[in-house]
Image: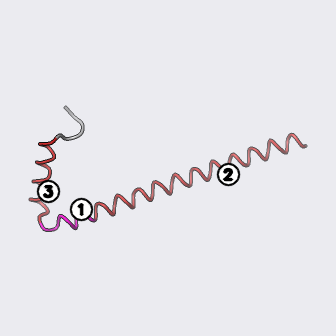
């Protein structure tokens, strides 16, 4: 019922896109691709920040435990 479009639905979507965008379709697709790439870069940056923060947190925890054992 709902979900990913099947073969005929994709065909209808393609025809509608051709009618709406026509000659600009390559530019629209290029812009869409660039937008997806930028979005993925942003997500990757956030994941890197989270990984870095969790690593720093783990190091601090380990240092505190080491100091407690030594102290």
Q: Give yes or no for residue 28 being in the magenta stretch.
A: yes
| Residue at 22 percent of width and 64 percent of height | 28
- Rounded to the nearest angstrom, the CA distance separating label 2 from label 1 is 41 Å
Determine which of the numbered discs, if any, sits on residue 69 in the image: none
Identify the colour scheme used: secondary structure
Are circles 2 and 1 on residues that touch, CB within 8 Å? Answer: no
| Earlier residue among tags 2 and 1 | 1
Query: Which corner quadrant holds the C terminus?
Result: top right
| Earlier residue among tags 3 and 1 | 3
Query: Which corner quadrant holds the N terminus?
Result: top left
Are circles 3 and 2 on residues that touch, CB within 8 Å? Answer: no
Where disc 2 sits, the SS reads: helix
Q: Where does the image place residue 30, in percent across and percent down from the top left?
A: 27, 65
Q: Quadrant of residue 21?
A: bottom left
| Residue at 74 percent of width and 44 percent of height | 61
**Residue range corresponding to the magenta coloring:** 23-30
Q: Is residue 68 left or right of residue 33?
A: right
| Residue at 13 percent of width and 68 percent of height | 23
Which residue corresponds to mark 1?
29
| Earlier residue among tags 3 and 2 | 3
Where disc 3 sits, the SS reads: helix
Q: Where does the image place residue 57, in percent across and percent down from the top left?
A: 68, 48
Determine which of the numbered discs, if any, sits on residue 56 in the image: 2
- Above or below 11: residue 29: below
Are circles 3 and 1 on residues that touch, CB within 8 Å? Answer: no
Which residue corresponds to mark 3?
17
């Amino acid at each position: 019922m709902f979900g990913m479009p099947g073969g005929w639905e994709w065909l209808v979507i393609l025809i509608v896109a051709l009618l709406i965008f026509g000659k600009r379709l390559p530019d629209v697709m290029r812009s869409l691709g660039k937008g997806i790439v930028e979005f993925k870069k942003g997500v990757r940056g956030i994941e890197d920040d989270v990984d870095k923060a969790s690593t720093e947190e783990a190091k601090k925890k380990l240092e505190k435990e080491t100091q407690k054992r030594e102290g």
